[in-house]
Amino acid sequence: MADTVRATDVEPGIRLLELDRPERLNAISPGLLEDLHAELTRLADDRTCRVVVLTGRGRGFCAGLDLVERHGDAATSSVTGAERTAQDRMRLQKRIAALVPALRGLPQPVIAAVNGPAAGGGLALALASDVRIAGASARFGDAFVRIGLSGCDIGVSWLLPRLIGASRAFELLLTGRVIDAAEADRIGLVSRVVPDAQLREAALGVAREILANSPFGVRMTKDVMWSQLEVGSLAAGIALENSTQIATTFTADQAEAVAAFLAKRPAEFTDR
């Protein structure tokens, strides 16, 4: 098991990924960065896992990049420290940013169960998930602009306006304002807000609902939904839907789903 990311099969088909640096509000250290990349790589080829729940241990989801942790040989107390070269900074930047397409590219839907702060890189992880459920203590923010950096970082400036609209995204990124769970719910950043004690069970409940559907149908739904964010026209979007929909009709699971519906029984999917 990785030192900073716990991976647990909590139920058949459901993998719980817990960022495990609670003493640092699960801020992204070099170790956590590599451990999370390793877990996402394993998940990409794991057909036994059909849904992922991503959360943080302790009081926080992820507080962003750890500015105290020392980063290898080019050690510095801050990612903007004078000791780090431009090449070092770019390698680190690209490695962190690569988590976003890695999450999007997983065949499994990812449900972010956001507990406490989701800031900077933590916000990016939540935005790159497919579903976001917030605990009452959740907080969301991108404060880079407040420390002299651009608020456009790690995919946030692409994802955020597509989720909440350009006007709200501009305001949040330009001010660096942190919003609470209630506001995140009101502007559509999260699907729902639940008491902190019920957060994990709420996420598992959504995971179980997804598991009730055919594996290929779920994978294609995730893939097409993300692709539609980049498709340039309605005609191209419909063409993508058409080709995917016809592909699903050739699966054994689609026939099983229809048979189960007609017989009023749970479907038994084989991912074929």
Image: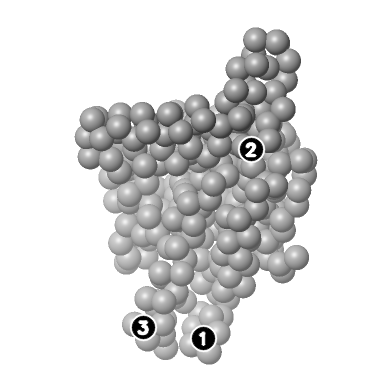
Near mark 3 (Cα within 10 A), the count class, few <14, some 14-19 or many ≥20, is: few
Q: Secondary structure at mark 2?
A: loop
171 on left or right of 20: left
Is 95 above or below relative to 41? Answer: below
* Residue 270 percent location from the top left of the image: 68, 35
Disc number lying in front (1 or 2): 2
Q: Residue at x 40, y 59 (%)?
A: 154
Q: Amino acid at mark 1?
A: Ala
Quadrant hosting residue 79: bottom left
Task: Tell me whether the residue at label 1 lies in contact with that at label 2, contact meaning CB atoms closer than 8 angstroms.
Answer: no
Quarter placement of the C terminus: top right
- Taking the image as drawn, is residue 150 in sight? yes
Q: CA distance from mark 1 to mark 2?
A: 47 Å
Disc 3 target residue: 87
Depth order, front residue of 97/121: 97
Q: Residue at x 63, y 38 (%)?
A: 271
Q: CA distance from mark 2 to mark 3?
A: 44 Å
* Residue 158 percent location from the top left of the image: 33, 49
| Numbered label tally | 3
**Which dot marks residue 75?**
1
Q: Amino acid at mark 3?
A: Gln
Q: Residue at x 41, y 53 (%)?
A: 142
Disc number lying in front (2 or 3): 2
Q: Residue at x 25, y 35 (%)?
A: 236
263 on left or right of 148: right
Depth order, front residue of 271/160: 271
N-terminal of the pair, mark 1 or mark 2, is 1
* Residue 179 percent location from the top left of the image: 46, 42
Disc 2 target residue: 271
